[in-house]
Image (cartoon, rainbow, N blue to C red):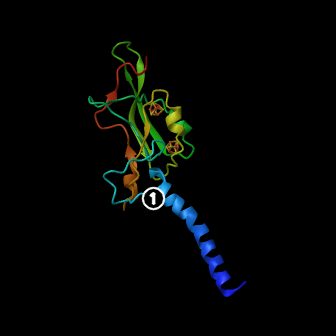
Amino acid sequence: MSYFGEIVSGIKTLLTGMKVTGKYFFNARKEIITQQYPDNRDSLVMFERFRGEVVMPHDENNEHRCTGCQACEIACPNGSIEIVWDRKVDEETGKKKKYIVQHIYHLSMCTMCNLCIEACPTDAIKMAQNFENSVYDRSTLTKVLNKPGSKLMDGVEE
Ligand code: SF4
Ligand code: SF4
């Protein structure tokens, strides 16, 4: 190939490669563009399927849906959940009833497999989308999910 032929061939090859890049540059959908984290922290919206950590929602009356049944603890493959429970006398029936004392969650061990959430019969826990969990003290990654003074919502066990 002549000298000029090689130049023409080189430019052609370059343009072929640039065609792919150019196609993405002009037609890329918004969601496949790399996000500028942490600059976009205020506007960042995680994907719905993203799993950040297990949490226990409470309502405005500080009530949750956890009965202390331990299904999540049993379902967890690596012991990330510990349920501390006790029994007390139900004033209505006079019978002893199980209740949760502490729902302990070890975030540092959790693999976000979702098995505990699927196992919960009362939808008491769910996955949150928080992902900024870097800490200097690992013990702070052990959390008690039921808030102090909280109690079981009426009607959950019916
Ligand atoms: S998401 Fe998986 S690993 Fe994490 S606490 Fe639940 S069952 Fe355990
Ligand atoms: S979170 Fe759900 S599965 Fe776990 S102890 Fe509470 S009610 Fe049972």
Q: Amino acid at mark 1?
A: Thr
Viewer-nearest residue: 11 or 17:
11
x and y, in percent, of residue 65 in the image: 39, 28
Q: Secondary structure at mark 1?
A: loop
> Which residue appears at 28% of the width and 34% of the height?
149
Query: Can you say whether 93 is above or below 36 in the image?
Result: above
Viewer-nearest residue: 43 or 95:
43
Ligand 1 neighbours mark 1 (CB distance < 8 Å): no
> Which residue appears at 29% of the width and 37% of the height?
148
Viewer-nearest residue: 135 or 3:
3
x and y, in percent, of residue 1 in the image: 73, 83
Residue 16 shown left or right of residue 154 in the figure: right
Query: Can you say whether 83 is above or below 12 in the image?
Result: above
Q: How many marks?
A: 1
Q: Which residue position is annotated with label 1?
A: 34
User: Tag 1: Cα neighbours inside 10 Å, few (<14), some, or many (≥20)?
Assistant: few
> Which residue appears at 38% of the width and 14% of the height?
94
x and y, in percent, of residue 128 in the image: 41, 43
> Which residue appears at 48% of the width and 51% of the height?
29
x and y, in percent, of residue 48 in the image: 45, 41
